[in-house]
Image: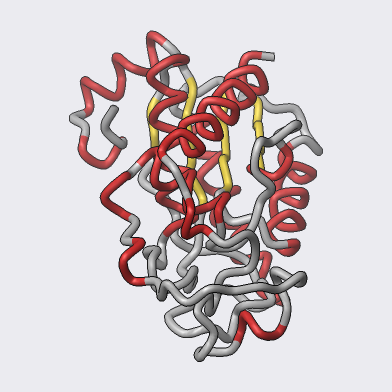
């Protein structure tokens, strides 16, 4: 499944005629630890969107690598909107939705791999605006942590995000970049994880160094089932 930016007009038209769904993956530019790409969130959302589109049809947009403010905004190689600038993201998505509706798209699915509190607020505001008037196109907004009964708890750069990205894009993760120094700590998102000297610097959550392919596939398939059910309702 290619994204819309690489498709010819007749391919896009054919895909929308068969299934008028638009998939819009959202992410951010963030440091997730030395083992992961800074665009992890959008790469994950894109991978899941393409897999879901293979099942349900439609077109997949290239990912938007811009996310709302999070507590790790000061981390290296991280670019996030400030809290007061949330409306920039909302308006950009709103304009995208308006144009999609004019193309005859019947359902737009925004899947966010970035799940900071401000990202929730931005998507809530977008949905409120969209549904405040009659629309020919339905809007579905999905945030990965909202999936029930997740086999691995959501985190930032930890086991959840590492396993998931590895399952949709195996070459994107390089576990050899992490130290093999053992870590024993109860607070998996404490201040120590924001210390560059810490073996798991920038990783807020369960240590990903024992990740397995099986964990990633289980998580991926669980999320895909939820996404498919949410979009098909």
x, y percent for residue 155 = 64, 57
Q: How is the image coloured?
A: secondary structure
* Quadrant for the N terminus in the image: top left
Name above or below for residue 180 compared with residue 127: below
x, y percent for residue 116 = 68, 62
x, y percent for residue 147 = 70, 34
Q: Quadrant of residue 222?
A: top right
The answer to whether residue 138 of the structure is visible from this angle is yes
Q: Quadrant of residue 84?
A: bottom right
x, y percent for residue 191 = 71, 84
Residue at image location 42% in from the left, 72% down from the top: 180
The answer to whether residue 79 of the structure is visible from this angle is no
Residue at image location 30% in from the left, 36% down from the top: 4
Taking depth in this image into account, of 198 and 154 the one nearest to the observer is 198
Taking depth in this image into account, of 233 and 74 the one nearest to the observer is 74
Report the number of discs. 0
* Quadrant for the C terminus in the image: top right
Name above or below for residue 8 compared with residue 62: above
Taking depth in this image into account, of 80 and 156 the one nearest to the observer is 156
Taking depth in this image into account, of 99 and 114 the one nearest to the observer is 114
Name above or below for residue 161 compared with residue 47: below
Residue at image location 47% in from the left, 77% down from the top: 181
Residue at image location 55% in from the left, 40% down from the top: 97
């Amino acid at each position: 499944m290619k994204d819309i930016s690489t498709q010819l007009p007749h391919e896009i038209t054919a895909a929308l005629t068969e299934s008028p769904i638009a998939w819009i993956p959202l992410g951010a530019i963030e440091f997730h630890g030395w083992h992961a790409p800074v665009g992890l969130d959008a790469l994950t959302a894109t991978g899941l969107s393409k897999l879901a589109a293979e099942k349900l049809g439609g077109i997949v947009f290239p990912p938007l690598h811009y996310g709302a403010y999070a507590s790790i905004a000061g981390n290296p190689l991280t670019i996030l909107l400030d809290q007061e600038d949330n409306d920039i993201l909302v308006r950009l998505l709103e304009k995208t939705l308006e144009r999609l509706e004019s193309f005859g798209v019947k359902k737009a699915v925004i899947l966010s791999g970035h799940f900071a509190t401000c990202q929730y607020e931005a998507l809530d505001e977008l949905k409120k605006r969209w549904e405040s008037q009659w629309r020919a196109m339905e809007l579905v907004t999905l945030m990965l942590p909202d999936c029930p009964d997740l086999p691995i708890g959501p985190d930032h750069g930890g086991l959840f995000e590492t396993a998931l990205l590895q399952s949709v894009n195996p070459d994107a993760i390089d576990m050899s970049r992490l130290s093999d120094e053992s870590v024993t700590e109860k607070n998996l998102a404490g201040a120590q994880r924001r210390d560059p000297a810490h073996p798991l610097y920038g990783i807020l959550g369960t240590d990903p160094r024992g990740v397995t392919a099986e964990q990633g596939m289980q998580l991926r398939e669980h999320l895909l089932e939820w996404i498919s059910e949410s979009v098909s309702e």
